[in-house]
Each structure stands twice: as C-alpha cells, then as structure tokens.
Image (tube, rainbow, N blue to C red):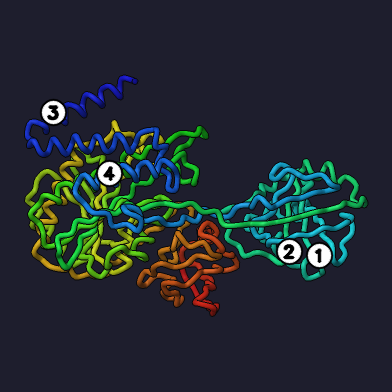
Amino acid sequence: MNLFMRLLIILLFASFSSVGQKLKKADKVVITNLQAHINYLADDKLEGRRAGTNGEKLAGEYISNEFQKAGLEPKGEKGWLQPFEIYDGKQINASTLLFINDRELKLNDEYFPFVFCPTASLEAAVSPALKEKGVPWFYDLKDVIEENKENPHFDLINAIKTLAGKTADKGATALFVYNTSAIPDDLKFDAKDNSRPLAIPVVYLTAKACKQYLADEAATLDLKLKTSIGDKKRTGNNVIGFLNNSAPTTIVFGAHYDHLGYGEDGNTLQRSGDKQIHNGADDNASGTAALIELARLLKSSKYKNNNYAFIAFSGEELGLFGSKYFTEHPTFDLQTVNYMINMDMVGRLNDSSKTITIGGYGTSPVWGNVFNALSRQKYLTVKYDSSGIGPSDHTSFYLKNIPVLFFFTGLHSDYHKPSDDAGKINYTGELFIIKYIESLVNQTNTKGKLAFQKTREPATTTSARFNVTLGIMPDYSFSGSGVRVDGVSDGRPAQKAGIQTGDIIMQLGSFDTNSLEAYMQALGKFHKGEKTTVKYKRGEETKEGNVEF
C-alpha cells in the first residue's frame, strides 16, 4: 500500500466519522449492511459476476436470500429467478473437420471455416491449380491484398464473400483461401459476425497448412470437409422479489448485478493484457446493495399505496439483456407499473460536492413538483438529466412508455477496470441516496399513477469511434443478421428515412450491417453533412431510405 492510498483511507475514515456522529442507529445498520452486501458481491470468488457464469449464480443466490430475509415474495418464473438466453455470437461446432490426404488438420492452427459457412459435407479429389465444376476451388489472396494495401476502404471479408459467390456460380463446391503475401491479412473466425450463410463453404488455410499441402499446386489432394457453424448461448438470470400491498399500481426498483468477469466480452477499459477479475464494486454491486436495503426498509414503511417490485437484472453489461427480457416477458402486469427507479453506480458520491445525477426527469410531468418538494434536503446536490434513454436498464422501461428515474454518482477512473473495488465505496454517501429515494417514494405515495411523457434525447453518439448517428436504439439481444431497431429518436436521420421500431437495418451505403459491430464500423465511414442510403427490412419486405447525417 503506497502513501497516497494510506492518506486516502485516513480521509475516508475521517469523513465517515464526522458524519457518523449525526447518524441514527437505523442509518448505521444500513451502512453496515451495504458494506456486507458489496464486500460479498465484489469478492474475487464471484470472478466479476459475468452474466451466465457461476459467479453470477452465486450473486443471484445471495440476492434472493436477502430478498427472502427482507420479507419479499418470489416473482420470477422459477422461484426468485427469471432465466433468459444470452446470444454470445457464433461458434464452430464440434462436428467441423477437415482431412487432407487422410490427415486431420488442426482447427485454427491449420485452418478455420469462416462464420458465413453453411452446414455442409463433401469429399473430393482435386488439384489446387484446376478450377472445374463440381470440386472445391483454391484461391491465393496475395494479389487482392497487395493491390489494396493503400486503400483504407478495402474490406477483405467482403471481397472473399464476393469471390465465393462468383465461384459458386461457376460450379465450385467450396472455396479454400490462403495468403502467400508478406502483408498479414489478420483473418480469423469472427464470432460477432451475423452474416447469413453463403451457398458454399469458405475455409481459410494458414501458412502452416499451405507449406505442407500447397507447395505443388499440380498435386492431387484428397479432401474430406464438414462445416457446421452454430449459435453460442449462455443463460443469465434476473432476480425478482415482490412486496404486495394489494395496491392497483407497482413501483419497480431495479439495479443490474452482473459485471465484466475477466473482461472476456471486450468491454474492459484495462490497458494491460493481464487476465484480471473485474469486481465491479461501484458497477454495480453498489446499486444492487441499495436495492436490497430499499426492499428491507420499504417492507416496514407506511407507504402502502403502491406495490413494490425489486429486480436485480443480469446481462446489462452486454446491452440491457435482462431488463429488455423482463419488459418483453413481465412476471406481473406491466400496465400496472407506476414508475421505475434504476440505480446504477451509486457508490462514489463525492464528499465535497455531494452531487448525484438523476436521469429521466422529463419522463413525467409530475417529477418537477416531486423534486421541488425534495430540494429542502441538504445532504445531496442533484443534477437533472431529462432523457428517458441512457446507458442502463431504465431505458427498457422508458421504451414501454413508463416514467423512469436513473440514479448515478458519476464515472471515475476505475470504471470497467479491475480496480473498481469495495474499499473505494462511499457507504455513507450511498445511505444518503437510499434515504433520498425513500423520501421520493413518500412524495409519490398519494399521487396515483404518474403520467408518462416522451423526452428529447441528447445529441450524443454511443462511441468515440464515429461522429454521426442514425438516431436508433439497437436491440442488443437480437441474434439474427442485421441490427434490429428497438427505438427511433424523433427528428433524427433514421426517422426521416422511414425506419420504425422493429425494422432490421441491413445496409448503410455500400456497407453491410449484418451485426452491431459492422453497423458501428459502417457509421465510422461517414461524417456530419454526408448523404447516403439505408436498406432495412420490415417483415419480409426490404425498404430503402435516404439519410443525411
């Protein structure tokens, strides 16, 4: 432990001590409980709570046990749990194989099928130098790679797909590609590519395989090939508890409890290549701990004009998987939901500014009066964000026309890094946030069902890799080819092009958008003021619209 860390800990304890003298006994119990919850959820033994892993399972068991102790009733599909499938991209199925001259080649070391391979099986005796009907063809990528080495818009994968289509039209039964150029091609099996299967298998042969089998192109090779590409899936679980006050409306409290695991899904901001556990104390053990404590406090409260649902979502880090699944498959009537409060990263309240951002301010005309009444409370400084759409689970509820609020203490240098640990949480600050939410529930206790209103979204993009946006909310859980639209912003290019919720974007300009990653890469090709076209599917019909960024 370095000197800086020692001083930081001393200051934190000093802050806690000065506030602690003013705390009631019940407040101190909340702080002790928060520490216990976060220390468990952010412990290394949970291995970062990646959705669909044993760490997530352990966290889910802990949360359901705490819900039970708080006096909630289970409201999942299987007790406390609501399982849902997480599409994890494509995989090469175990039945895939390649034999050349009765020797089985090693997958990835000597060959791999591209993700757009169909399920196929063939046997043939063929000379690589010959291109005849009814047999596989071989193609060296050297010339096309070297011809385009200075072309920033060249897409080698699309070139291979085009080549495969042409060879299939000429009667080839498969296409084997390889590269004898000194320029690396960086080709690999891309599990995130959702391209539709082509007419024939397309297989890459590595330099190791080329050296052994293609040294003499006139030689005859006995081939046996099987290709099988399938969906890779895992199962996540929402944890749902319910407090039934026999009221006509229900307030939903939500927080995601999944985190990044070891960063396997590519969403870590860790710069080193070391495999480390991302414990996610603030993101979002803090919100989950607040959820548990609110359940315990509201069970014994006098605010009985609403029922209360407490949902710990999984799959948020992958793109709101759990909350989207819940709103599509609710375990109680979604029409009875009064409003939804989402707590994501509420553990780093600054002791000096005491500032918390509350999103969703514009999602109901009632919020203005509610927050005016709460402004007399001096222990928090509130910044408001009007939008109902944001990078967390409240978005799924807003898209169902439900008023939402999003509590957030802000980004910090430990965000999505292994250093987001329990020792850095401001537990007293989190207590204040919980008390504030309690007061908010009190303010709405007699207001009945809150009216919903749509909000204007902030004109920001979701990635620094591109400077323009279509103005859509993508459906991150969609596993088909293309990008399915979960929401469309008013006045943005997508709406002007005629795109509606449920449409599937297939192409932007000349760029295929068969996956979300491909869509983002396509956006990166455009700049503000440029014009292009967008192709999208609505049901079985393909449509095209004009876009100006």
Q: In the rendered image, which residue does mark 4 sit on?
A: 65
Q: Quadrant of residue 109?
A: top right
What amino acid does circle 2 point to? Answer: Ile
Mark 2 and mark 4 residues within 8 Å of each other at the beta carbon = no
Image depth: mark 4 or mark 1 in front: 4
- Label 1: which secondary element: loop
Q: Residue at x 68, y 62 (%)?
A: 118
Q: In the rendered image, which residue does mark 2 sit on?
A: 200
Say the numbered circle drawn on residue 17.
Answer: 3
Mark 4–mark 1 Cα distance, whole angstroms, equals 60 Å
Residue 35 sits above or below residue 9 on the image: below
Mark 3–mark 4 Cα distance, whole angstroms, equals 31 Å
Q: In the rendered image, which residue does mark 1 sit on?
A: 172
Mark 2–mark 4 Cα distance, whole angstroms, equals 52 Å
- Going from N to C along the chain, the mark reached first, 2 or 1, is 1
Say the numbered circle drawn on residue 286.
Answer: none
What amino acid does circle 4 point to? Answer: Asn
- Going from N to C along the chain, the mark reached first, 2 or 3, is 3
Residues packed near mark 3 inside 10 Å, few (<14), some (14 to 19) or many (20 plus): few
Closer to the camera, 408 or 307? Answer: 307
What amino acid does circle 3 point to? Answer: Ser
Instruction: Classify the position of the N terminus by image quarter.
Output: top left
Residue 336 place in picture, x, y as percent: 22, 68
Residue 86 sits above or below residue 337 on the image: above
Q: Residue at x 46, y 56 (%)?
A: 85
